[in-house]
Amino acid sequence: MNRKNPRRTLFVLLALLGGALSPGLVLAAAPPAAAERDAGLDILLTQKARDILERVRLVDGQARTRRVEVSADIAKGVVTVALDRAFLPADYGPSFEDQRSEISFGLLHWAEQAAPFSRVIFLYDGKEIEHYFPEIKAADDAAREAGEALRRIRGTPGSGMAFVAAGHGYFYSYKDNRWVTSRDEWNGVSEGLLTPSYAEELKAVIEQRSQMPVVRPRVQTMGTTHPPSGEEWWTIAARYAIAEQYPGETKIWNTYAGSALWDREEREDINSRPLLANHHRAEVAIHLHSNGEPSGSARGTRVIVQPGRPMDAALAQSVLCSMKELIHSLPEHGAFTVAPAPHALDKGENREAHMPSIIVETAFHTNPDDAKALLDPVFRSAAMKGVEKGYRLWATGKACEPLALQALPDVEIPLHSSREVMVNFAGNPQYPLTVEVSVADCDRLGVCTPWEGRFDVPGEPVKYKTSCTSSKPGVVRWSVLIRDADGVTAPPVEFNQACVRV
Ligand SMILES: [Zn+2]
């Protein structure tokens, strides 16, 4: 910390507040003027960045530094992390991307308590990483152009196929000279060993509901053991499973041939995923991960897209909206945090893809409650149904909107007759639909009979008959509720039915 900094008192105050800091306190700690509030947030984020940089695992070429300034542009939703060139890696690879992601989500956890943010930009001596590694920008531009060219030629980008990739898995490290996973175990979750169950779930629901074949690079079967590692095949990174299935396609899985880098096979693994999706001309690429962040406090679902790709951002937005709907349909996860909008970060898995590509970070394995959710098969199923639904709505040009009943007018029905009640609703429910009509109030106990019905065919009117079979007039207040096949429920709507003598 710079001891001459005039804002030191505020630093200390913010640092002391530590983990208990709330957005209200951020504002309270800063002077009242609007512009100064931003300064308070910048100071907090800079302090948090210093804490993270003190502990973060360095990648090759980096020197430990605490020289960092963070500024948050609330209007644009951008957090900028200004570092110096001592923090440049020797080479741009997955460890570096992981580190940036850890820093990003560590900072977003604090920033987003004050305002929504969608992007984190890193500067090294004032310039973005592409300035030092122009090949990254070249790969990004090439993939974007290839994708646009494909869409121009065909109108639609692909083959009717979806690509689903489970993140990470064992790869061979030439530093340790052994097979390693790129993620430590946190709260009982080892990311690369958890993601295959998510991919399997998503593959099944896409095949069933989107009616698309799904390619998965990592495989569940193929013998039991991967001989070189002695590990089970399902635990092995995509690169090796692709090499086994497509031995001649070295351009997909052997992109670092001849390299002496210790993590060359991990790098090949990251690249092999989008390159296989491109090879299959998939319509969409969905990468499944869990998230990590050093403090352990960040929670919730995020979806990451490549900066400057509006189609991917629209897909990600729809996926987040549907994941929220499905996850919140579970009573025990009714308040689970789902990001309101995608986050733009440069990631190898999205960057090389010729089709809309998203990284779904379902929850933070670094947070104990999120980790518990990740290990819960009910949560997993709801989350993956949400991903599929978000994709399907986006692909068919439908907006993700909450399931909601329209108001039902009060009715008067002559004794010994009946009439139809039309149940109109907004949203995109999964059929069959259940309509539950229960008694909110009945002026003659035992005379009003609840009703439940099932509707199987999407698009057909949802209606039922209500009648007055009694010989005496009376009034009933009905409560109507609809529930879809996934357990998504619209809030109940009530109306009065009067049985009248004519
Ligand atoms: Zn990951």
Image: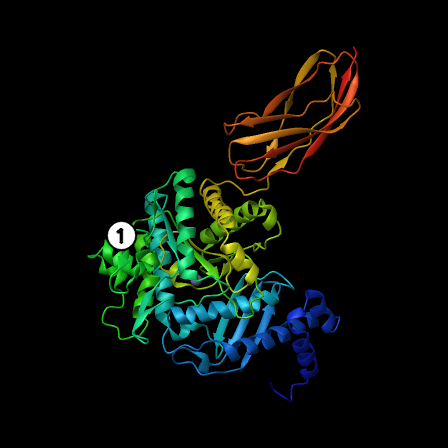
Residue marked by disc 1: 222
Residue 356 visible to the viewer:
no
222 or 9: which is nearer to us?
Answer: 222
170 or 109: which is nearer to us?
Answer: 170
Residue 309 visible to the viewer:
yes
Asked if 140 appears above or below 30 in the picture, the reply is: above
Task: Say which residue appears at 56% left-offset and 39% top-offset.
Answer: 487
Residue 136 x/y as whole percent: 37, 67
Q: Quadrant of ligand 1?
A: bottom left
User: Residue lying furthest bottom in this view?
Assistant: 4
Amino acid type, mark 1: Met
Q: Locate residue 140: give its quadrant.
A: bottom left
Asked if 456 appears above or below 271 in the picture, the reply is: above
Q: Locate residue 496: give its quadrant.
A: top right
Task: Say which residue appears at 24% left-offset and 53% top-offset.
Answer: 245
Q: How many marks?
A: 1
Residue 180 x/y as whole percent: 35, 68
Please give left or right for residue 43 compared with residue 58 in the image.
Answer: right
